[in-house]
Amino acid sequence: MSHPHTPVSSRNLPPIPGPLSAEIRGQILALWPRYPSKQAVTLPALHLVQDSLRCVPNWAVEEIADILDLSPAEVHDTMSFYGFFRTEADRLGVKRLWVCRSLACSLRGADELLEKTAALLGVPVGGTTADGAITLELAECLGACEGAPACMIDDEHVHDICDMTKMTELVTRLKQSSANKH
Amino acid sequence: MSAYEPVLLRRLGKKECQSIAGYRADGGYKTLERVLREMTPDQVTTQVKDSGLRGRGGAGFPTGLKWTFLPKGHPGPVYLCVNCDESEPCTFNNRVLIENDPHQVIEGIILASYAIRAKTAYFYVRYEYGFGTRQIQKAIDEAYEAGILGNKILGTDYSLDIFVHRGAAAYICGEETGLIESLEGKRAWPRIKPPFPAIEGAFRKPTIVNNPETLANVVHIMDRGIEWFKSLGVPPDPKNPRDAGSYGPKLYCVSGHVNKPGIVELPMGVTLRELVDKHGGGVWKGRKAKGAIPGGNSMGVIPESEFDIPLDFNGPGTVKALGLGTAAVTVFDEETSIVDVLYNLCRFFAHESCGQCTPCREGTGWMLKIVERIRNGQGRREDLDILEEVADRIGIMPGTTICGLADGAGWPVKTAIRKFRPEFESYLKEGTRGGVRLKMAGAH
């Protein structure tokens, strides 16, 4: 299930300090009334944390478990099932760039696009660039097959990234926007 | 035959196609209002059942019949889960619906929820549809504001809440009980059935799981009636006693080596050939097609010589493909190696097997390794037979797994080897033509 990515601990990142902000705690608590069980809030809570911290640190797993009356093992069990969530050592860059490799995209050059993008960024698939700007991911069908090969930034499809010229432009744009964020 | 006028996609590309004002200006929510005032839930169920509507998610189970499986007189709660996980490769019809006409889907959700007496509906949507998720959420907010969701919808006694629940990039969440487990906050391991979700589903309560396209059809069945719905599509095949017919409109996705990849709405039963040649603009680069998957990866592979099958619930089975699936056609041209196509399909299933059942977890991995070995020029003579044997033994049909993912993984292997065996054999004999690993040939 999990993506075959290599943890890029060489980035030597400082630990993310806990606890969760009052805002995130509030957002998690606000989801309670939607479901008849607190456990159902697990996935939305993991999303809220990762959206904000670019990973789900162990202390956040414990905190989510505490809020939802679960054992940390239960939260971790769910979290680790989805290759989607990242640990602190393996946290995401500012932007997550997905390249689809399923059939419709592969037939239009996706495998090569993914391979060359990894070379361009100097990271393995799943890795994050040294400047922390971009994490490269492979995707199994993004559901944007009419624009194959399909790519996605975080959760929005980007269109027309059909070759390395376009990909290089996209990468430059992403790096600039992340530099502006710092 | 005159050109078919789209129904489900009729508002696509129109100004204001996403807003509640635009939807209402086009007559939206009038059907809902009439149904809530004039019909009982059971009458809605009966109308949907009698229309012959079958689920658009892949299995084609009769929708109204599914609704009747709910326990009679249950004190509740009963839940509707909308399955917008849509992760079958090459499929994007529900994405187009929620991005462009979210209120049509919401009207369908309310009608279905009314019919099954649900007061809560969960809209489970795959993470990859960020834009669509925001469109649906916006539409839900608008509907609450307009009194179309929440307490006492449109002044009637019926109340409903819809909550959006995002997935996290796992194919298995499209399996209805995997979806339910995921919704409950657990790993998305499918459940052993029975009990089916209609008896014991989300939060151990009776639950109906339906696909957005199916629910969009419900709006038009309630609006235009059974006769209209049955005037489209194909009646049951008299040669197949298990065929319940394929009525109504269908969204077909076309992708791969065609000139115009995209989505088209047609009455059920268009031939694969017409879809490729007419609606997909023909095979690209002036080449011929070698084959296609007729309805998402799980349905298997068929050669160009079988492109005259109708894409209805019965058609693909007549050439021993698994079925219609999601009606997402992906074409590959004559320069593409079937070994590469099969490698891609096996890689997908090995990646997405949830790991719960050993035959699937190990079998999808074995099949990938063997196909990879063949592809790298190290194939053995017995490999094709081993592949077929593994493919035949994993899945819910041979009775070795809990859900159908493994059947879907086996079908591409079986069909590719049975329908393209000479190409595999010559590949085995000649290896990789001088040690060069082939890429997806058609991509170049």
Image (cartoon, coloured by chain):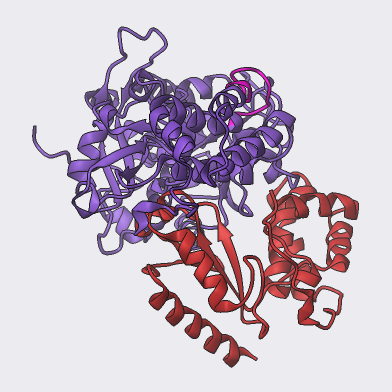
Chain colours: A red, B purple
Q: Quadrant of the C terminus of chain B?
A: bottom left
Q: Residue at x 44, y 54 (%)?
A: B439
Q: Residue at x 32, y 7 (%)?
A: B239
Vertical order, B26 against B393 (above or below): below
Q: How far across and how far down the image is residue B316, in percent?
A: 36, 25
Furthest toward the front, the residue is B434
In terms of secondary structure, what is the magenta stretch mainly? loop
Furthest toward the left, the residue is B1
Vertical order, B435 against B374 (above or below): below
- Is B78 displayed left or right of B10 in the figure? right
- Is B303 displayed left or right of B282 in the figure? right
Q: Quadrant of the N terminus of chain B?
A: top left
Say which quarter of the image contains residue B267: top left
Q: Nearer the viewer, residue B383 or A23?
A: B383
- Is B262 displayed left or right of B176 in the figure? left
Task: Confirm whether residue B152 shows in the render.
Answer: no
- Count every numbered label the image shows and give the total: 0
Q: Nearer the viewer, residue B160 or B180?
A: B180
* Magenta highlight on residue B372: no
Q: Residue at x 24, y 52 (%)?
A: B284
Q: How far across and how far down the image is residue B279, in percent?
A: 21, 45
Vertical order, B339 against B358 (above or below): below
Q: How far across and how far down the image is residue B368, in percent?
A: 60, 40
Task: Confirm whether residue A162 shows in the render.
Answer: yes
Instruction: Give the magenta-colored segment's residue range.
Output: B392-404
Q: How far across and how far down the image is residue B386, in percent?
A: 60, 26
Q: Residue at x 63, y 74 (%)?
A: A123
